Amino acid sequence: MPKLIIDNREIEVPEGIKVIEAADRAGIYIPRFCYYAELGAVGACRICAVKFVDGPVKGIEMSCMINAQDGMVVSTTDPEARDFRRHVIEWLMMNHPHDCPVCDEGGHCLLQDLTESCDHGIRRYKGKKRTYVDQYLGPLIQHEENRCIQCYRCSRYYQEFAGYKDLGVMGIAQRIYFGRYAAGVLESPFSGNIIDLCPTGVYTDKPSRYTGRRWDYERVPGICINCSLGCHITVSARYREIVYLEGRYSGKVNGSFICDRGRYGFFYANLEERPRQGRVRGEDVPSGRAITMAAQRVKEVSESHGAAAIAVIGSGRSSLETIAALTHVCKVQGWRGPVLFDSRVSSESVRTAVSCIAQELAVSMKEIESADFILTVGADPINEAPMLAMAMRQAWRKGAGVAAIDCRSLDWPFQFEQVTAAPDDMADFLAALENSETTVISDRFVAQIKSIAAKIRACHRPVVVCGTEITDSKIIYGAAGFVKAMRQAGQEAGLFYTLPAANSYGAALLDEIGETAEDLIERIESGEIKALVIVESDLWDTFSDRQRLIQALEQLELLVVADFMATEILHRADIIIPTLSIFEAGGIYVNQEGRAQWSPPAYAGGTPIKITGQGGHPPRIIRPDIPAGDISPAWRMAWWLADRQPPASHDLLLDWMGKTFPVLEKAANFTSEGIRLYLPEARRKTARETGGRKIQSLGEYLLLPVAAVFGDEPMAQRSPCLEGYAKHPEMWMAASDARLFDASDGDAARLQLPYGPLELTLRLSERIAPGTLIVYRCPDLFWQQFARSSRFIVPKDRIRIEKKA
Amino acid sequence: MQPIIVIGFLNNMKVLIEIAYALYMGFYTTLKNLFRGPFTEEYPEYKRPLPARSRAQIILTSDPDGQERCVACYLCSAVCPVDCISMQAAEADSGRRYAKWFRINFGRCIFCGLCEEACPTSAIQLTPFFENSKRDILKMVYEKADLQVDHCGKDKNYNFYAYAGIVTKSAGKGEHVKEEKPVDVRTNMP
């Protein structure tokens, strides 16, 4: 452990870190452009020059290029070093355009800050400035290459860190250019991070272009809820709307970066069609009035048909507070629910995953980066939980091997070995890996499985990543068993699940029954349920059989829908109650490893000024309140629906949650890293072979709707800027199956499904498991979304292929 | 005579002279002003020309070529000590950044001139016109159209977009003041 003195402060740092990082640890800021903790140093910008006064190195040196060594005496404020840096900034600014007033980076620009702090004001060089032609990089990122100072952060991040090749650096000397070879939409779903990384305004956020300056924003540290990972973000709000989200450092979850789905998935909170008023039978009423009327109607139904005739549906996109409140209210009122899962398979899978994950088995996403072998089972990180793919890439960059047992044609930004297994066979493959029992699997795979098993056995920190979407509870249970077995064998094995929604874990913690929407529809059909209260959930999106759903809803006496998004089901509600989004109400979300994290409200709520002013000046009215500022969070509404008084404040609510639900006992004491919550031993489930329906005979195909990074998640798919990123309706088929149909890539496929026909473009891949058809969920599919974790058996004669012209 | 008495006598003489001088000056001033005209100006009838840099009513000026100067950079609203300026920037079809709406609440404004000092494009300027009191407080809230003028104000020459290097309808990359032609990365020729 070298000891060194920086600015008269003695510090001890681990071996092998650079002086600039050592200074960071001591709380001393050395100017930097090219250095970034995650990306390391390249010594390109020369602004981190410091004076080495004594020790093994002497004189002016770049602090990002010199390892911290014992006996070093470093001065960052030495006049010689300051003078050096003043000259560096002067030559960096030589070609920088005079456009700060119209640049979106102005106000939080590192180049601006360091130019000021290095005392450079007047440009002495009288020559002409170099210019570049900018490129169109898609609807998310604005390019202005004139501002570039050649720090290489973007190309290093994009190519080395994220693993995509379409943005990079070209040219030499005075003609260095950062961009794509030809203008076009950036391919990486992690491209937005170059906005945060760029120390000046070369890449700026396009959807929030010119919206404001950093100093005007209401900024809070938040949690992303566009997948189950719970990445840390910084939320910026202005004029009563969310302006943009940035990655926020977390040493446990996401590191510094976030994916584009998380970065741009917030627009649902700003949309004009969002419910902002109560609505009772087509008439607008204040939201408080809608709640009292709903409570009254619910009471009437309860009196005439009994309390059990009322059912409540929640979802994994609600906060833990809302789920807890709904659970409590249902319990004390005798209502049915809350139903928190879409389908039986999904309920079973999620609850098994939550049961299996335990203190010693779970690893955080950041810990995956130090794994030395990663095995994925039925998980497609890039589509289900994009940042997980990024974490896996970092492990791969450090030399970890990656193997995937999956039936999809996986496309990840790193090398991996795929065992193409049908969903029904995955459990067998997992068992084969665990105990080298290869008799159950097809001979074709024996050699491959044996080699993977040998690799896993040889490493110290293997991680098993298991999906919950196309897998069943047997596989999920098997993954945990495998990890346990490796632990017993002395390996520091880790377990990581991906879950369908941001708070699926929280839902499984509180839901002891595990009832699903499917069960509920059956009860409505049998006349048992007369009133339905849907809170922040959309059956339209999650229940596949739309005809049946419509008929069931017509049988109801009362349908109350409370949501912060304009969902389809809203249009069929008798009473609409608006609720608040995470940005206005805040909320606790439990991510897939059981980490409960608190996201505070970013702004007070209300209709955005863009809407009240119709794009122009805000209305010239003096009013004491905020327009549509009277909406209450869903947890308060839950109590009021039952005609009870909710806890008076959020703090009291947390106290109450800890007392009422033993599993949430720790939830009130938050740290910035969150609190890990696990199911107590007594409530853990053991595996039950429920699974989906299996293929009965040859000539039947298993159709799996699977997650897509864009256009699938219910909140992010509402973002106008992400519209073009959603996949087109495609059906992937094994190349060997295609021969039976005499089909080729690009043909049109027509499926006759129980709920209606489906038209898709056929795509072929060798890596699709035979007998499996993969459809990525996208908004263009005719019923918009397949239910999560649903599977369909399609007989061969229901598939028609039309040759492309 | 004792020296102390002499000093006392001289002091008394000095006081007497001062009193006499003050009396004379007082009467002189009074008499002089009795016979000359009034100093006051009949304000609404006569308006004294004020120096161009006196600070009152705020305007949004135009570029020498007639386009709006304000790029809605938010610097004036940031520097304003009473928070009386608010705006929203947007991008015009011509590629210029402009204020979609711009509002100054003169009910709050203290005419300190910091906004003018902060403005990087010489758009916002204070003028000597000070007669802007109103009976209705909402009328003190000026919108963009109330603030805009079609002249350059005190700065006759500066045109921000001629220097900024931003592509607009009037100039592309490399066509602004002191700019080289855009780099072609696909060639190695100097």
Image: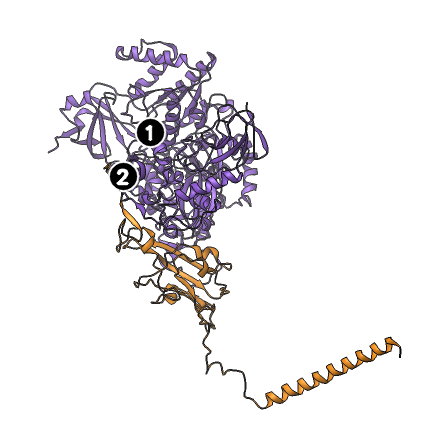
Chain colours: A purple, B orange
Q: What element carries label 2?
A: loop
- Dot 2 surroundings within 10 Å: few (below 14), some, or many (20 or more)? some
Q: Can residue B105 be seen in this view?
A: yes
Q: A176 or A544, which is in the foreground? A: A176
Q: Where is residue A613 in the image (x, y as percent from the top left)?
A: 38, 58
**Looking at the image, do the residues carrying marks 2 and 1 touch, with CB atoms under 8 Å apart?**
no
Q: B107 or A146, which is in the foreground? A: A146
- Dot 1 surroundings within 10 Å: few (below 14), some, or many (20 or more)? some
Q: In which quarter of the image is residue A186?
A: top left
- Work out how far the residue at label 2 is from the one at label 1, CA to CA, in angstroms: 16 Å
Quadrant in which the C terminus of chain A is drawn: top left
Quadrant in which the N terminus of chain A is drawn: top right
Question: Would residue A670 appear left or right of A548 to someone viewing this image?
Answer: right
User: In this rendering, is residue B98 above or below A733?
Assistant: below
Q: Would you name the residue on which mark 2 appears?
A: A185
Q: Can residue B97 be seen in this view?
A: no
Q: A208 or A557, which is in the foreground? A: A208
Q: Position of residue A473 (x, y in %)?
A: 38, 22
Q: Would you name the residue on which mark 1 appears?
A: A163
- Looking at the rendered structure, the kind of residue marked 1 is Gly
Name the chain under label 2.
Answer: A
User: In this rendering, is residue A13 above or below B108?
Assistant: above
Name the chain under label 1.
Answer: A
- Looking at the rendered structure, the kind of residue marked 2 is Val
Q: What element carries label 1?
A: loop
User: Which residue in the rendered view is the most extreme toward the bottom?
Assistant: B35
Which circle's residue, 2 or 1, is located before the other in the chain? 1
